Image (cartoon, helix red, strand yellow):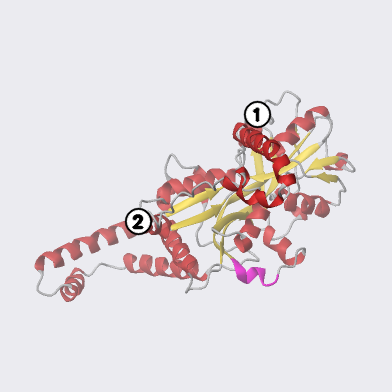
């Protein structure tokens, strides 16, 4: 690009120098000079003009955007796994998008074209309600399901031995727009400790902790975090405990052990902390919109195929996700609520004794005078019942 720009400037300079004198003598001659003779580069033909409208429609038909997070965080990893498991040619295509994190993801749901679903933290919605005061935020942004727990990591330098030691010290709350940018200040406010909060990408913050420029950092995310385990802890950094009794409905207790962070915690020791639930959020698209049908299909695929995410090579945290769990302060998207009711009804039906005679009657009504189709429907029904009873 730089070479091309240089050549263009050089060409224009030659043209300009060779025509300046004549233009000065005869202004009217400018219209017929070399600059006027420069032609606009031809535009590439569009897909529609090339007869590819059907291909464009096919590719875009069931595609939706998923706002995740930064490469070193767990949002992007879970987004990639979700896409890998649910993506299917011509049926559904999820595009995980790298973003600053939990806070910006909610903004993207509200304002950015092409973003339909997003990962965020449960406490972020309260921030938009009380701090930014976005009108009707709880009606515009709903949730599909609770996800895994985002464990709050408070990493400090070796000379910091207690939360009180951080009073007046610099602590990083990750990048603006991340979950830490919300959870970090909330945590220290509830603990009654005043720190000097700064906003630095945590990968950079780790390096600044080495020099003593920062005393600590806060990072919410599913344990274990690659951010820490891929960092060579030569400086003796350690995790501080955060007492759970200071926190409200958005948080739950958690612990870190040597199995999670062998470079930071000694065998047999534990570090108590808190965690904030991660939420799979969605924009409340109206039923008549084109985006609605895409989100509806995603929800059906996500709920129906959750069991497949419980197996390798997917993260073991998928197994802990309860699709029916409620998230305090949030409203479940009505499509997800209806899907849960249908699944519960199907499970109840499958648990009742199977009446084969009644099943035969039903398939006969569905395909009268077609014995082959009746048999196919009957066997399909038996397979469905078998699958439901395994769940």
Quadrant of the rendering where the N terminus is positioned: top right
Distance from disc 1 to disc 2, alpha carbons, whole Å, reads 65 Å
Give the residues in magenta: 135-141
Vertical comparison of 281 with 341: above or below: above
Quick one: which residue is furthest to the right in this view? Answer: 168
Quick one: which residue is furthest to the front in this view? Answer: 25
What number is the disc on residue 267? 1
Q: Can residue 153 be seen?
A: no
Vertical comparison of 56 with 162: above or below: below
Q: Residue at x 70, y 71 (%)?
A: 135
65 or 33, which lies in front?
33
259 or 75, which lies in front?
75
Quadrant of the rendering where the C terminus is positioned: bottom left
Q: Earlier in the sequence, mark 1 or mark 2?
A: 2
Horizontal side, residue 194 vs residue 297: left or right: right
Q: Label 2: state its secondary structure.
A: loop
Horizontal side, residue 223 vs residue 375: left or right: right
- Residue 2's x, y, as percent? 63, 33
The residue to which callout 2 is attached is: 51
């Amino acid at each position: 690009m730089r070479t091309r720009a240089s050549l263009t400037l050089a060409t224009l300079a030659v043209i300009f120098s060779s025509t300046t004198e004549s233009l000065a003598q005869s202004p009217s001659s400018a219209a017929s000079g070399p600059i006027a003779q420069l032609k606009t580069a031809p535009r590439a033909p569009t897909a529609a003009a090339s007869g590819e409208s059907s291909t464009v429609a096919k590719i875009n038909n069931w595609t939706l955007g998923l706002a995740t997070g930064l490469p070193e965080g767990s949002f992007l990893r879970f987004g990639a796994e979700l896409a890998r498991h649910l993506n299917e040619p011509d049926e559904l295509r999820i595009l995980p998008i790298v973003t600053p994190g939990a806070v910006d993801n909610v903004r993207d749901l509200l304002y950015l074209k092409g973003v339909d679903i997003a990962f965020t933290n449960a406490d972020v919605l309260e921030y938009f309600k009380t701090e930014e005061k976005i009108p009707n935020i709880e009606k515009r942004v709903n949730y599909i399901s609770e996800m895994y727990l985002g464990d709050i990591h408070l990493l400090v330098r070796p000379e910091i031995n207690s939360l009180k030691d951080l009073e007046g010290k610099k602590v990083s709350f990750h990048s603006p727009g991340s979950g830490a940018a919300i959870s970090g200040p909330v945590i220290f406010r509830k603990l009654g400790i005043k720190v000097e909060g700064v906003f630095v990408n945590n990968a950079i913050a780790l390096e600044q902790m080495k020099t003593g420029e920062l005393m600590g950092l806060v990072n919410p995310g599913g344990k274990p975090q690659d951010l820490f385990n891929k960092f060579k802890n030569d400086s003796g950094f350690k995790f501080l405990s955060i007492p759970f009794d200071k926190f409200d409905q958005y948080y739950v207790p958690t612990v870190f052990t040597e199995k999670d962070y062998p470079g930071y915690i000694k065998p047999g020791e534990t570090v108590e902390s808190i965690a904030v639930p991660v939420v799979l959020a969605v924009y409340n698209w109206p039923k008549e919109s084109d985006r609605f049908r895409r989100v509806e299909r995603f929800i059906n695929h996500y709920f129906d195929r959750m069991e497949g995410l419980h197996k390798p090579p997917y993260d073991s945290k998928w197994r802990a996700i309860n699709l029916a769990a409620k998230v305090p302060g949030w409203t479940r998207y009505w499509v997800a609520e209806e899907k849960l009711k249908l699944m519960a009804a199907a499970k109840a039906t499958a648990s009742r004794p199977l009446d084969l005679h009644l099943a035969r009657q039903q398939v006969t009504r569905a395909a009268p005078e077609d014995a082959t189709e009746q048999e196919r429907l009957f066997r399909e029904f038996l397979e469905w019942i078998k699958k439901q009873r395994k769940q």
